[in-house]
Image: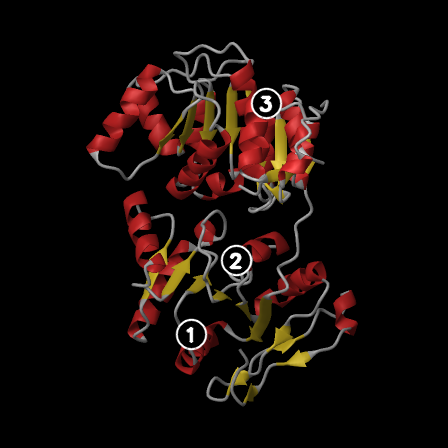
């Protein structure tokens, strides 16, 4: 389905034409018409599916067509991190190119006083669209720098990450200030019970759009070591001695684990930095800058960076812990093999995580290659299912010490003769 087959207004379609976007992604095709119809929407889709355009395009179209107050905050988009807020703001610039009266401001922490003053001036003047992190927006609200009493649209992006980062109280405080008839849109990459509860409390009779989680890109070489917990650092030491350790992300399930692993890697003379929710925004920005600039070889992180961070040249992703489900696994290893590059994903499977990883393999519809443990590491657990499981009949692999490792209505605008290349809006 093309954008011209919707009833997005002409100014939006002109911007999409200039950007060479014609065909909608599935999440856009299923969300845009409902948002244009004024419905609350709950969207469940992975990063990279085009969800930013799925909510920005219809909201911008309605703001451009409608009679909304010039001195009000007409739309609030909430994002969990400064980086995502900046990405949404950049997408907004392109989509609103022909909308001179619809501007945006990104509001986030970790800035100097000059930036805060700039935010204050824009907010008091009535910025049509505010893209904000919860903490920063709440700070402005508490000192009376803005009023949400006349806000018409509210978007909660990456809701699962919001909850993981502890923003639930901030979100509830903010949403209590919205008018009753405010149209709300909520997106999440996953749908755990806490996100479902949040959706029930915030949304009114929503349309639910859920896309099936995509399997990892074929260019990702997926491998695993079946090992005991004490063997994991020994394997990492072996991996990094055998090859180039630049552009590596090691994912761990808990922030305390991240801190401990980073300390131990430093003892091994590995140039690494931790990334977790205990860091301030300024500290996270500094870590990401150093990693992107090549000043840090290895990033040890919680799932705070498994989604929404735009780094195209990650060579290896290591799952120090098996993710909780297939969706988290896909998001983590999806940090590599981007922009047509090859990538490698290695997962450490402890004896406690075998059943969980077998469930991930069932989702992948493939068995991930199990690598032999390095000779000096010792013998690992047997990779087998419980006797009552269907998987007990599958091939059993015993990971032993061995040699080395392996790496609405259409507009009918008649533009087909102008040489569009038919790209999809994946912002």
At a point 63% along the width and 78% down the height, the residue shown is: 382
Give the image location of residue 197, x and y in percent.
59, 33
Instruction: Residue 6: give its label.
Output: none
- Residue sitting farthest toward the left: 113
Q: Which residue is drawn at 68% across and 64% down?
A: 361
Q: How crowded is mark 1: few (under 14 residues within 10 Å), some or many (20 or more)?
A: some
Looking at the image, is mark 2 or mark 3 earlier in the sequence?
3
Q: Do the residues labelled 2 and 1 touch (CB within 8 Å)?
A: no
Q: Give the labeled residue for mark 1.
A: 233
Q: Residue tagged by mark 2? A: 339
Q: Which mark is nearer the camera, 1 or 3? A: 3
Please state which of the two labelled residues, at mark 2 or mark 3, is closer to the viewer. Answer: 3
Asked if one can make out residue 182 in the rendered structure from this viewpoint, the answer is no
Q: In the picture provided, is 208 more to the left or to the right than 281?
A: right
Please tell me which of labels 1 and 3 falls first in the chain. 3
Eye-nearest disc, 2 or 1: 2
Decide which of 246, 16 is in the foreground and name it: 16
Position of 119 compared to 96: left or right? left
Quadrant location, the N terminus: top right
Q: Is residue 266 left or right of residue 243?
A: left
User: Is residue 201 positioned above or below 272 on the image?
Assistant: above
**Helix, strand or loop for disc 1:** helix
Decide: is 352 above or below 236. Answer: above
Q: State the separation of the CA atoms marked 2 and 1.
A: 30 Å
**Mark 3 closeness class: few <14, some 14–19, many ≥20 residues within 10 Å:** some
Indicate the secondary structure of the residue bearing disc 3: helix
Q: Give the labeled residue for mark 3.
A: 10
Q: Quadrant of residue 100?
A: top left
């Amino acid at each position: 389905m093309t954008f011209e087959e919707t009833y997005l207004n002409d100014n939006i379609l002109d911007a999409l034409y200039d950007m060479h976007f014609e065909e909608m992604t599935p999440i856009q095709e299923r969300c845009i018409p409902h948002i244009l119809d004024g419905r609350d929407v709950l969207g469940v889709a992975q990063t990279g599916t085009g969800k930013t355009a799925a909510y920005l395009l219809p909201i911008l179209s309605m703001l451009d067509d409608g009679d909304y107050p010039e001195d009000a905050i007409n739309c609030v988009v909430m994002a969990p991190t400064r980086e995502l807020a900046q990405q949404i703001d950049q997408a907004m610039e392109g989509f609103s190119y022909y909308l001179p009266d619809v501007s945006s401001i990104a509001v986030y922490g970790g800035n100097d006083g000059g930036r805060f003053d700039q935010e204050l001036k824009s907010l008091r003047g009535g910025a049509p669209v505010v893209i904000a992190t919860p903490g920063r927006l709440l700070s402005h609200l508490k000192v009376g720098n803005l009023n949400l009493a006349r806000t018409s649209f509210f978007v909660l992006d990456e809701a699962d990450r919001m909850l993981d980062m502890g923003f639930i109280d901030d979100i509830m405080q903010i949403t209590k200030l919205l008018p009753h008839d405010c149209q709300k849109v909520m997106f999440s990459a996953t749908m755990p019970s806490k996100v479902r509860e949040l959706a029930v409390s915030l949304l009114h009779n929503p349309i639910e759009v859920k896309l099936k989680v995509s399997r990892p890109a074929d260019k990702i070489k997926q491998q695993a070591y079946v090992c005991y917990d004490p063997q994991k650092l020994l394997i990492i030491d072996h991996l990094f001695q055998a090859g180039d350790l630049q552009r590596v992300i090691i994912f761990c399930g808990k922030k305390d684990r991240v801190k401990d692993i980073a300390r131990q890697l430093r003892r091994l003379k590995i140039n690494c930095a931790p990334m977790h929710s205990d860091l301030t925004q300024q500290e996270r920005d500094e870590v990401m800058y150093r990693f992107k600039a090549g000043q840090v070889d290895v990033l040890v992180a919680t799932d705070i960076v498994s989604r929404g961070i735009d780094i195209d040249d990650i060579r290896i992703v290591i799952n120090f812990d098996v993710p909780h489900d297939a969706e988290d696994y896909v998001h983590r290893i999806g940090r590599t093999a981007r922009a047509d590059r090859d990538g490698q994903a290695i997962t450490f499977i402890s004896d406690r995580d075998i059943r969980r990883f077998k469930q991930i393999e069932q989702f992948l519809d493939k068995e991930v290659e199990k690598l032999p443990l390095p000779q000096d590491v010792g013998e690992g657990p047997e990779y087998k299912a419980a006797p009552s499981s269907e998987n007990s009949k599958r091939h059993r692999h015993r990971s032993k010490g061995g040699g080395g490792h392996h790496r609405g209505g259409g507009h009918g605008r008649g533009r087909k003769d102008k040489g569009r290349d038919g790209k999809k809006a994946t912002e």
